[in-house]
Image (cartoon, grey):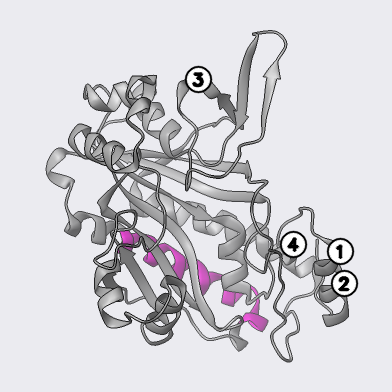
Amino acid sequence: MNSVYIPKGYAPVLTSYETQQAISATKRIFTDALCGELNLRRVSAPLFVEASTGLNDNLNGVERPVSFDIKATGTNAEVVHSLAKWKRQALGDYGFQVGTGLYTDMNAIRRDEDLDNLHSIYVDQWDWEKVIEREDRNVEFLKETVQKIVKAVCYTENIMRSLFPALNTHPVTTPNVTFITTQELEDLYPDLTPKQRENEFVRTHHTTFLMQIGGQLKSGIKHDGRAPDYDDWALNGDLLFWNYTLNQAYELSSMGIRVDAESMERQLVLAGCEDRRELPFHQGVLTDTLPLSIGGGIGQSRLCMLLMGNAHIGEVQVTIWDKETHEACKAAGIPLL
């Protein structure tokens, strides 16, 4: 279902051209900050992968990838949903060492996405991945990495406010991170839906990392879906900020310590996906030939929205919208690119 929400009294802070300048500055500043915090280097990445490799991100398992046949090779390709698996293989292919990693500008098409203020069929994000030691596969290492990403976000915001003084009309992003698991969140708000729980908690704890996403909770439901073959469900999470313009919890990043052989085997069984074991990527994990890693995706358009106080993602990216969204945004004075 498609929907659009117009905040009462909303008007963009920046002009259309200033917005373009701010998008460019945000991406440049944050990229440098993120690389400095996590010791990352840029690599080139695919827009599509061969379907037979098992490298595409299956997301929640129901989204249909955009696929096509390749005349020259006689094989089928899929436009990536994300590069969660590809990045880990690339770490090994490119010879990255422990403590170093890669990032890339990932562009994807998610044709089954419902359209609203935060979701479009076009996805742009910084996909990053870093080689770790086995002893780094723990919650404390995960938390330290999250805090470094938040530091890069806050640094970028400070620079943007100096470059574009009009942005100082918006509240500042909170640098202090509150960590909570999905089970702890369910225990706090047992009568609310997962999304309602996030809103209630992040309303008070403005920067939150919600951990352990993918497995069933005590209630028998999942907080949210996660593919079983990249994040370790015990060592992952979503980075949430409070969006003052939309008055809701706002996911900027999904990330986690990646599966090792043991956790992949367990999660494939839980998800009923044992047939994936024989795919090349999965064999690389199960035979310990792929490096252990941590990684995630950070929304580029979402970061721009957050730091510029935009109400709709169409203000910072070009994509296709339904007629109702166009009409509602035009009536409210919201310029869609």
* Residue, disc 2: 327
Prevalent SS, magenta region? helix
Horizontal and vertical percent position of residue 138: 16, 52
Q: Is residue 205 depicted above or below 209 in this figure?
A: below
Q: Which mark is residue 20?
A: 4
Q: CA distance from mark 2 to mark 3?
A: 42 Å
Answer yes or no: do the residues labelled 4 and 2 have beta carbons within 8 Å?
A: no
Q: Which residue is mark 3?
A: 52
Mark 1 touching mark 2, by CB under 8 A? yes
Seen as rendered, the residue at the extreme bottom is: 9
Q: Position of residue 294 (x, y in %)?
A: 30, 44
In the rendered structure, which disc, 3 or 4, sits on the residue that comes first in sequence?
4
Instruction: Kindly give the residue lying farthest to the left in the view shown.
Output: 135
Residue positioned 54% across, 58% down in the render: 29
Image quarter hosting the C terminus: bottom right
Asked which secondary structure carries label 1, the reply is: helix
- Alpha-carbon distance for marks 1 and 2? 6 Å
**Residue 208: quarter of image:** bottom left
Q: Amino acid at mark 4?
A: Gln
